Image (cartoon, grey):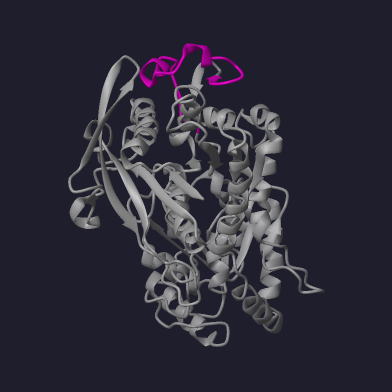
Amino acid sequence: MKILIAGSEVVPFAKTGGLADVLGALPRALRTLGIEVRVIMPKYKCISDTKFVLKPSHLSPLYFEFPMGISTERASLRLGTLPPLQRSDIEGDQKEVPVYFIEQNKYFDRDGFYGDEYGDYPDNGQRFSFFCRAALESLRVTLYKPDIIHCNDWQTGLIPVYLKTVYREDPFLKNISTLYTIHNLAYQGIFDPGILDFAGLAKELFNYHQLEFYGKVNFAKAGLVFSDAINTVSQRYAQEIMTPEFGCRLEGVLQERSRDIYGILNGIDYEEWNPSTDKNLRERYDDQTLEGKQTDKKALQEEMGLPQKDVALFGFVGRLAAQKGLDILSDALPVILKEDIQIVMLGKGDASYEKLCREFSLKNPQKVKVVLGFDVPLSHRIYAGSDFFLMPSYFEPCGLGQMIAMRYGTVPLVHSTGGLADTVMDYNEITEEGNGFSFEEYSSSRLFETFKRALSIYQNREKWMRLVRKIMGLRFSWENSAKRYIELYKKIAKFHSPEES
């Protein structure tokens, strides 16, 4: 089976969020399971030839032209690779994964991926229409015909549309199936109807059942309507997006396609996130040498300028935004800080929440420390040095932080939504079942009640240590996720079996 994964960002080449992590990990996991997989993405300004040693797709950059509306566009194709998984316990194929870069300086030679300090780029509709069509046209010049194109978020939403309309009878491109993955439905790619002229798509598609969305063209809706199947990054989120609360005004479209919607949980790289080998830590440890975790806790307290004492330390790594629960957390903090605890926060986001977090830190210097920005080595030390990991998100399609935290023996405290509900089972003090602390009602009062309950278990050292050791043994691996994707690919490929061609 041949798979082409299309997306707007891929680790290590370009990253703004979790999408990049998924597209950097999933292809490599698929490769180890014998799938012939390739990746395609834009070549942004930050993807330099020297940094990533890009190779021409053949002996020199491969140029190709194709129509976009009434004009002709030109692109070049460059080739890089994702390194194989460096795992001694994997017996499968560990070859590199080819990565194709669509190069067109007019659209992608910019400092930002989607916008700058002034907001989104006004030509994002043109930029990613171009990318979708260029991705398809590039298949002719590489002579790589995938069975399935795996599209990711709105930036690739027009690929299924092109395949079902413009290329429907194309001898080379017809009969390619598509999977559209929703990483975060809140981001949809909404543009004026004139984008259809640029994209070379028929105006007849501008209707309620296809591309029209409140008088605009919606690229995410395009992917939802025209793809052969849809999936999200957790089973709970797959259910939530079909409701008005989380459907972002697309719940009707999703309800119509409910039979074609699947949930597949993301994974994490257990070699990258490994407290027994992590070079960012003061002392490495595992579930049998948890003294090292206490050393890392003291080191984190020292680094943050907090008193080095044995109190519950809560860590937070993520965007400072309402979606991540900063509204209820900020409401609950005045009461939470009456307890003998410490909080370390790392992230950036909305100016109002950045200001609020700074104020809490200034007013409570012995209890709260906030680092605005993002620092990868520090994030590792927060995961290792904290006792609890705060993730009270209003909604969370999957979430990786709670999985990483458990790998480091840091107990998650979460709002039960999306992927958090699928990965964190509420702890039962009597049976000791569960692997974290969660609350259903999204409110500061429920957050505080859960905080108090978690604190009481922390103070029972025997139960606490059993819980820490248990969560360190859990595995949310990409290998498991990749197997689920392969099952889904096989279902989709049946839509275009040889008998149907």
Rendering coords of residue 142 (x, y %): 32, 42
Task: Name which residue lies at 44% across and 26% down.
Answer: 170
**318 is higher (above) or lower (below) than 125:** below
Task: Name which residue lies at 46% across and 77% down.
Answer: 88
Task: Name which residue lies at 36% across and 62% down.
Answer: 83
Q: How many numbered marks are there?
A: 0
Rendering coords of residue 436 (x, y %): 67, 66
Give whichever of 348, 233 is nearer the camera.
233
- Is residue 208 in view from this perspective? yes
Instruction: Report which quarter residue 388 is drawn in.
Output: bottom right
Instruction: Report which quarter residue 214 is drawn in.
Output: top right
Q: Horizontally, is 101 left or right of 369 in the view? A: left
- Is residue 443 in view from this perspective? no
User: Which residue of the protein is positioned furthest toward the right in this rendering?
Assistant: 430
Quadrant in which the C terminus is drawn: top right
Give whichever of 314, 317 is nearer the camera.
317
User: Which residue of the protein is positioned furthest toward the front in this rendering?
Assistant: 499
Give whichever of 197, 356 is nearer the camera.
197
User: Which residue of the protein is positioned furthest toward the top in this rendering?
Assistant: 204
Give whichever of 422, 458 is nearer the camera.
422
**151 is higher (above) or lower (below) than 316:** above
Write down the region rendered in magenta. Answer: 188-212
Q: Is residue 328 within the magenta segment?
A: no
